[in-house]
Image (cartoon, rainbow, N blue to C red):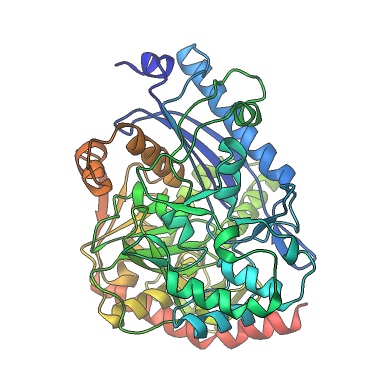
Amino acid sequence: MDRKTCIQEGKAYLGIEFGSTRIKGVLIDKDGEVLAIGTHDWENRLENGVWTYSMEDITEGLQDTYRSLAAAVQKEYGVPLKKLGAIGISAMMHGYLAFNEKDELLVPFRTWRNNITGPAAAELTELFDFNIPERWTIAHLYQAILNGEPHVDSIRFVTTLAGFVHWKLTGEKVLGVGDASGVFPIDSVTKQYDAGMMEKFEQKIADRKFSWTAKEVLPKVLCAGDVAGVLTAAGAAFLDPTGTLEAGVPFCPPEGDAGTGMTATNSVGVRTGNVSAGTSAFAMVVLEKPLAKLYREIDMVTTPDGLPCAMAHANNCTSDINAWVSLFKEVLETFGAKVGTGDLYTKLFKKSLEGRADGAGLIPYGYYSGEFLTGFSEGRPLFARTTDCEFNLANFMRSVVYSSMGALKVGMDILAEEGVAVDRMVGHGGLFKTEGVAEQYLADAIHAPVTVLDTAGEGGAWGIAVLAAFMAVKGENETLPEFLNAKIFPGMQGHTAEPKAEQSEGFEKFMELYRAALPVERAAVESMK
């Protein structure tokens, strides 16, 4: 079937993912080939000490992304986008969206980026003997309880960003198991919220005498391949205010960006792993067996079909790179030079390859927000250097790219010491767009090969579109790994970076200084209010 016919007959699959700085829609066919793309740039804001996006931001972003994609379809194929085979919604995991019985938002959206639930996370970790990071939805809910926030008794539904958008479009209060695993711990046998831990939580808050239970207000958990509702007439009008898109489209379960990253890199099988690197960065490894003990630095989440994963999550990654590139662009424009932003990124990343493997004594901290892996509840972007450093452009860019992986490296070292085995690590996200740079540094950092697939630039939006296609066309009893291996990834092109001993040694030396200078970052947080 040609592409135009595929679209006209409603056999194309749409994935929309809400990333930290960009919302992206990707339309694919049943083989995963990209038919069209739509985007919308947005940015979170710090309001009253809380990182948030407004409801207007979410609505405008969703509609503009779809508008952009529909326009791309019309321009490329000369047909309107009226019918779809399936839709999937994905977004940044964790966070807190709480609604009352009138479906009204009770407090502004609290995103994953907030490190404001320390007491709750610590108490729940001890209660469950299971790591509960500050980002998790249950930590946000319990912290609101501990704070005595008046909205808590009015809660009737608590969800994530993906769960909220899915609910708006389908009316269904559900989550994919991967996203749900960042809400509350999941039992990988039942692939539902852990019943024992849920009972402990209910007992913990019983004396508060709320008019709800956690089991009642948290979304229902579904797995990859399940039908998670259909596009309602109201949902179709919300997504496409022009009225062109027809209702009735089936939806796959809404997923978090970790699950779509695993899907986009074919890293859902045991001993596979991936690193997603954009505004934040996280490394996922699908485990053969549970970790030997609890690590506060390591999240335990699941694949979209419920297998246990270890995740090292860094709140900060590319934001500081973006800021420096923007500054360099401004300098060039001051002198009348016209350089495309994409070309500037490529040239600067390539220039970094000329830098010293140990970073040459330059230490940036791109901590725009707190960084749990290194013990920070707040961040301050900071650049430091030794007096005898080699301060040139190549070393500067190398240190900035290195530093974007610094906190993640701390988490990966814990997994390495635990003896977690991985046969294949795949990188995806904006950090890997310039071939041969970030994947080489990451391979050097983790002492393992890193592959970047040609679909890496499409990221999680492509991944959730693939999950939508899986739900729609999977064979009877076909598993997600079987579907990906047989129908999506055969023949897919990519390139692999092998670790180089000398560069790995250099990265380790960089990390020695990175760790040693953390008190400088702490002083910046304390003094720069």
State whether residue 259 appears in this view. Answer: yes
Image quarter in which the N terminus is found: top left
Task: Residue at 42%, 20% (x, y): give it.
Answer: 10
Q: Residue 307: x, y in percent?
A: 31, 61
- Res. 320 image quadrant: bottom right
Picture quarter containing residue 468? top left
Q: Taking 142 as reference, is 277 above or below it?
A: above
Whether residue 385 is visible, yes or no, is no
Residue 317: give x, y in percent of width and height.
Answer: 52, 63
Q: Tell me the quadrant of the picture where the C terminus can be found.
A: bottom right
Residue at 63% from the left image edge and 69% from the top image edge: 140
In the rendered image of this protein, does residue 27 appear above or below residue 310?
above
Seen from the viewer's position, the closer of residues 20 and 511 is 20
**In this view, which residue lies farthest toward the top?**
78
So how many labels did they put on this image? 0
Please provide percent x and percent y for residue 311. Answer: 40, 68
Q: Quadrant of residue 474?
A: top left
Q: Position of residue 150 (x, y in %)?
A: 80, 68
433 relative position to 115: left or right: left
- Give the answer, above or below, for where 125 lies relative to 144: below
Out of 476 and 519, give the one closest to the viewer: 476
Q: Nearer the viewer, residue 352 or 188?
A: 188
Which of the pair 283/356 is nearer the observer?
283
